[in-house]
Amino acid sequence: MPTGIVAQNNKPLIKGQVLDEKDAPLPGVNILIKGANRGVNSGADGKFSLEAPGENAVLVISYIGYVTREISIKGISKELSIQLQSSGNTLNDVVVIGYGTQKKVNLTGSVENINAARLADRPVTQLSTALQGIAPGVTVTTSTGAPGSDAGNIRIRGIGTLNNANPLVLIDGIEGNMNELDPNMIESISVLKDAASSAIYGSRAANGVLLVTTKRAKGDRLTITYNGFMGKQKATNLPDKVDALDHMRLLNEAYVNTGITPVYTDQFIEKYSQEMLTNPDEYPNTDWQKEVLKGSGMMQNHSVGISGSSGKLRFLTTLGYLHQDGIVKSSSFERYTLRNNADVKFNEKVSMKLDLQLINRNTTEPGRGMTNVFSQMNRIPAVQLGRLTNGKWGEGWNGNNPIAMVEDGGALKNNTLSMQGNLQLSYKPVYWLTADLVAAPRFVNSYDDDFVKAVTTYTGTGSVAFTQPAKSEKTNTNARSYYGNYRANITADKQFGSHSVKWLLGASKETYYASDFTAFRDNYQFPDYTVLNAGDKSNQQASGSASEWTLQSFFSRLNYDFKGKYLLEANARYDGSSRFTKGNRYGFFPSFSAGWRVSEENFMESLRSVLTDLKFRASWGTLGNQNIGTYPFASNIALGSYSMAGQVVSIGALNDMSNKDITWETTTMTDVGVDVTLFKNLSITADWYRKITDDILLTLDIPLYIGLNAPYQNAGKVSNVGWELGVNYNGRAGAFTYGINFNISDVKNKVLDLKGISASSLLQSREGYSINSIYALEADGYFQSQAEIDNHPAQVGVLAPGDIKYVNQNKDNIINNDDYKIIGSTLPRYTYGLNLNAGYKGFSLNAFLQGVGKANGYLYSYAIQPFYSGGTAHEQHKDSWTPENPNAAFPRLTYGDGGNNYQPSSFWMKNAAYVRLKNIQLGYSLPVSLINKWGMTSLKVYVAGQNLLTHDKFWKGYDVETPVGTGNLYPQVKVYTVGLDIKF
């Protein structure tokens, strides 16, 4: 028996101490016997003792914030002294890149690696939302909290096109939808931000690339995990609408200000205040928000994983279930996920990966649509009847009753079933050469079952008021798509003395085919029997379509480094797409990058204890964007029918002019960066980049005598110039561990060339300004007197003191379209995130703050403008202009005055900068010595909150993350959750 192991009951008793990098004791460290549910925690002095099953046992030592170690006790002759390295020192981390992996220390491109631990503290339903604020240069916005529709809109390093700006998402190397995945399945996400890292994907990489890697089986023992949480959702913000009495009073004021006789007398309002308590049918005081938002808002997510190994076969099977009920009764989302990742090692040279995935999603919302529900809920006055005391539906607004829409108006249901396989065969004839063959088909079937029920509404006296819509109607749509991905590549990785060379060469082919069929019937006599055949045949309709495309490619990458100091990389891809005509189908997309690890130079030897790593990087490359429509070069024949000579005949019409010279949108990017690691636990990454996109598709004006609609042309040009900074620090004081991760980035977007094209819409893209800028009049306070109005250029409508005054930009005598200008930008700038984590003896606290430093928002219509088109007012509208309140928050109240105050102007634009407590989680991990008795290796319970607190200066009642609109969107939600993570 070795002297370092004490025999006890014929079993070795292992003793030792766990230390950190500075030789200080680490208390609370988990020490487990590998392959057995047995373990202990180190004491306050870092020491431990553990009975092992035999001399061949292996210890697994793990602690939050440190790299896990495995140590065999065989041959140990003295008490163990185990030193753990901080996980903040990530230089040797392996990062997933295009068609391979690379050590982080050797990267020359701009790549952000997000591991599972950074995602685990954020219990979310859509994976894309977990990326918000977590990586510099990655902007994620969420416009709605509706179940199944609350995914994030991801932009990497700004917007470089007027068309599809979504990044390419690859799941284990295959293009897919990241929001289909259960977040518990994710091992890591790599964000490829510059041309050096993205050019290997060529024509699809102009908007950046997200490489999602799913978990695979590890170790040799059977492991079972469970991750689950339950939560309650609540709207983050809702407009505070006035009640019936205040609506009448404010409307009277608006009528008087407009020169109209008030609708309601003081006597009627007084009577109303009494009668609405006893006769709510004829004197309603409807709280539309309270009546509509009666959904439970409950949600639950469960994920079970089973992994194991039988020598040459390893598998990980994960089953996930998510159910989310909305804050509106008839809204819900349900997702079933089954994934099996298998690894087979036939021998030392041949291996195989076989992944299978099945996902079933069900989404439900009201039959008239969520937008219609919230538009009516936020505009209808409280004096309109919602529900009679006998249970019948009130007339709402001309029969549009959002309460009835939600509870009795039918449903829009979608079921999407997707199946995907991924087979990879690998052959390694010699240690430095690997050949891979990949085949990955994906099939998606989407079925829409939309039924809109005709709802009869009644007046307060019980007589029929309206039926909306006039007839119940049914629409069924079935869409299928098949995507195939086939790839072959070889990788040579060899070292020649101080020189290391790695070369990748490959070819791929991708195919896509989609078809859809739609059927429609209306006039359902039995609205509870909603099958298609139950509708009237007289107005039945059917339609269908299909599309397909193919992309074939050749790609290569060459890496070279000398002594780990001087790093070079070159990428190239040659893409051919069927979306373009012959002669324009192929594009070449190269990139070059270099890195210099200054810290490895001999003259830096004296600083090694302080400066762990210092690397300078630079890259240049070109990328493409083929997501510009299926066949934009072609003129399509519009098919239809027409009445001729008393008969209906089928016709075809050529309406659009073609342009066979259309080609890729091309992005050229330059990036310089620096990576610094100090004291092994403080890392800093900084980048500056310039991204120019040319040949953006536009429709330019053509002579009217041609008689066709203008074709697309490669004509636009957009630039994005920005910088990024990321700082990460991990520390410890005794048993207390802590970490700080901060990132901030900015990008300045500018449209360089639109060939003189300009629009007149509220949001538009103009030369010299950012994409989606706000185009409106410039407000200059209120008119305070009639004399001021008389001495000012003419404006819209009949003006009076208290109306908004506009700046006369061109110095003529009238305010009109010539005075409109760009007044703001909706694109967020100075986006940042701050993650704070702490741990103490099993307790953990994680707080994540996220925000935007500069942006503009614009609300209009029913969202914020009082009595717009017959709507109601908010409590904040009581602060409107009067002679006694000349500096009010809102102009004088008016009704149907010609619209001066409702003209698009800077008055309705607000600062959309904000900081939000995006997530906070408090957890406790039970001691290993306790849970071992229950057959577990880890057990954590936690409570968490999402979107709990927000500081902003935006319009009251609206979420700042949805800064532009008319108040017709499902609001963002706060989520309160309690969760449990178990590992057996």
Image: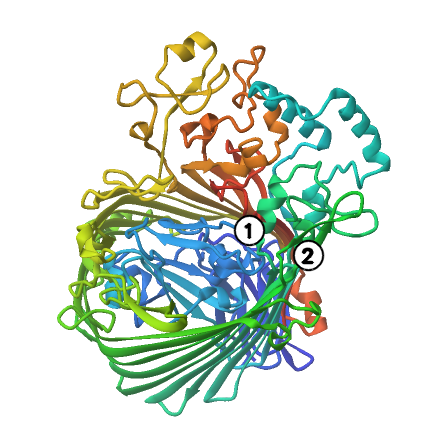
The amino acid at mark 1 is Thr
C-alpha span from label 2 to label 1: 18 Å
Question: Could you say which is closer to the camera, residue 122 or residue 936?
Answer: 122
Decide: is 719 above or below 173.
above
Where is residue 137 shown, x and y percent of the image?
A: 35, 49
Question: Could you say which is closer to the camera, residue 616 or residue 720?
Answer: 720
Q: Would residue 223 be found to the left or right of residue 579 on screen?
A: right
Q: Secondary structure at mark 1?
A: helix
Q: Which residue is rendered at x = 79% and y = 38% of the image?
A: 282
- Dot 1 corresponds to which residue? 371
The amino acid at mark 2 is Val
Question: Could you say which is closer to the camera, residue 675 or residue 315?
Answer: 315
Decide: is 278 above or below 730.
above
Q: Quadrant of residue 317?
A: bottom right
Q: Which residue is rendered at x = 38% and y = 80% of the image?
A: 440
Q: Is residue 735 visible?
A: no
Where is residue 408 shown, x and y percent of the image?
A: 70, 58
- Crowding around mark 1 (Cα neighbors within 10 Å: few <14, some 14 to 19, many 20+) is some
Q: Would residue 413 be found to the left or right of residue 202 on screen?
A: right
**Outermost residue toward the left in this view:** 583
Question: Could you say which is closer to the camera, residue 554 or residue 446?
Answer: 446
Where is residue 127 shown, x and y percent of the image?
A: 49, 61
Q: Would residue 303 be found to the left or right of residue 461 on screen?
A: left
**Outermost residue toward the front in this view:** 645
- Dot 2 corresponds to which residue? 455
Q: Secondary structure at mark 2?
A: strand
For marks 2 and 1, the one nearer the N-term is 1
